[in-house]
Image: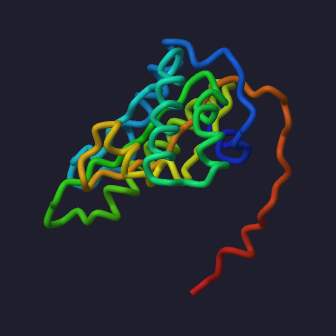
């Protein structure tokens, strides 16, 4: 896929089925994550690839954290099923490091760019993906279970697989609405 097609047709695909990215595809996706802007060369990221039985274990972490943090019955009831909505999930974590020239926001943005680069890489390979956040990206219990430090942030969960249905989403936004001259 050429860059123009990638940039103008990339979309999120919420309904994902097997197969997950192959080992070779996953290697390409990982390399894409490491090519993002990184002020100061801090590499403020950590990634956890979850598949197979790991998806069930992640669901258990979600479930336990929802109970421990007294979430609604609805959140608790769905928690175990959330990770199994795709054959692979990559958890992107921003690893904040105090630095005189690189503020926290830049480090978080770098980790977000890495997650987005992985989604674009997957899309360029004909795979589907969706970046999810929500309660389980903010949960202190989930962060603890994933061995995050106090300053770390879960930037998101990148669900990857094969799109269950081939639906090309329509163009929703026009540049003139969001850009202005100064």
How is the structure coloured here?
rainbow
Query: Residue at horizontal 47%, vertical 21%?
Result: 54
Quarter where residue 123 is shown = top right
In the displayed structure, does residue 138 sit left or right of residue 167? left
Rendered location of residue 180, percent (x, y): 64, 81
Query: Residue at horizontal 47%, vertical 25%?
Result: 57
Give the tally of numbered discs. Answer: 0
Query: Residue at horizontal 44%, vertical 26%?
Result: 49
Q: Quadrant of the N terminus?
A: top right
In the displayed structure, does residue 58 sit left or right of residue 94? right
Q: Quadrant of the C terminus?
A: bottom right
Rendered location of residue 65, percent (x, y): 45, 44
Pick the front one: 114 or 146: 146
Query: Residue at horizontal 71%, vertical 48%?
Result: 8
Rendered location of residue 14, percent (x, y): 72, 38
Quarter where residue 85 is shown = top right
Give above or below for 15 relative to 179. above
Quarter where residue 77 is shown = top right
In the displayed structure, does residue 25 sit left or right of residue 175? left
Pick the front one: 38 or 163: 163
Give above or below for 22 relative to 109. above
Outermost residue, top side: 23
Pick the front one: 149 or 6: 149
Pick the front one: 153 or 25: 153
Outermost residue, bottom side: 182
In the displayed structure, does residue 179 sit left or right of residue 150? right
Rendered location of residue 44, percent (x, y): 28, 47
């Amino acid at each position: 896929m050429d860059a123009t097609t990638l940039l103008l047709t990339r979309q999120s695909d919420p309904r994902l089925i097997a197969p997950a990215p192959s080992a070779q595809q996953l290697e390409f996706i990982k390399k894409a994550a490491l090519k993002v802007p990184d002020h100061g060369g801090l590499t403020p990221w950590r990634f956890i690839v979850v598949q197979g039985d790991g998806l069930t274990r992640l669901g258990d972490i979600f479930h336990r954290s929802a109970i421990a943090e007294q979430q609604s019955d609805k959140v608790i009831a769905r928690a175990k099923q959330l990770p199994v909505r795709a054959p692979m999930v990559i958890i992107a974590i921003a690893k904040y490091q105090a630095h005189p020239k690189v503020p926290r926001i830049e480090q978080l943005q770098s980790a977000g760019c890495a997650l987005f680069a992985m989604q674009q890489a997957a899309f360029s390979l004909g795979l589907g993906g969706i970046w999810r956040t929500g309660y389980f990206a903010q949960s202190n219990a989930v962060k603890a279970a994933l061995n995050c430090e106090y300053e770390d942030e879960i930037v998101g969960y990148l669900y990857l697989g094969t799109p269950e249905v081939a639906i090309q989403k329509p163009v929703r936004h026009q540049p003139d609405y969001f850009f202005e001259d100064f």
